[in-house]
Image (tube, rainbow, N blue to C red):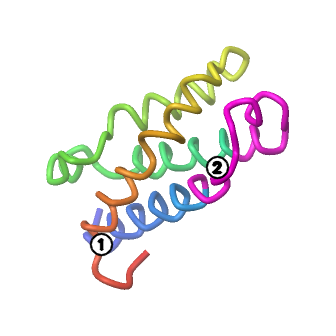
Amino acid sequence: MSHRDVTIRLRHMLGHAREAHALAGGRTRDDLSSDRQFNLAIARLLELIGEAANRVPPEERLRYPEIPWAQMIGLRNRLIHGYDQIDLDILWTILAKDLAPLISALERLLPPGDG
């Protein structure tokens, strides 16, 4: 995979993370349970982040140890294959605590104005 392709995947991850973070703004954990569209949108965006991460070759992932590759890919797999057992508390923790640091890390990796 070319460096350009890796950059595209990182851009996808950043875009989806930003979108999930923006959707969660002003929301509560209860909203995740009560608002089906919000729940589905967040689950889908987190799946897409994990899918883009999974498409970055393992040797390229090693170049960016600040990115939680295994966790993102694992979450994607859990959301896809364990769709009937999604723990909304875990999703909320990701929204509340993990997305902002991921966004910052991805912004540092991409050229200014990129993503």
> Please, what is the three-letter code of the amino acid marked with disc 1?
Leu
The residue depicted at 52 percent of the width and 65 percent of the height is 15
- Magenta-drawn stretch contains 30: yes
Residue at the disc numbered 1: 110
Residue at the disc numbered 2: 24
Helix, strand or loop at label 2? It is helix
Helix, strand or loop at label 1? It is loop
Q: Determine which quarter of the picture holds residue 44.
A: top right
Residues in magenta, as a range? 20-41
Instruction: List x then y, in percent, for residue 36.
Output: 85, 36
- Magenta-drawn stretch contains 48: no
Q: Determine which quarter of the picture holds residue 25.
A: bottom right
Quadrant the N terminus occupies: bottom left
The residue depicted at 19 percent of the width and 52 percent of the height is 64
Quadrant the C terminus occupies: bottom left
Instruction: List x then y, in percent, for residue 51.
Output: 50, 45
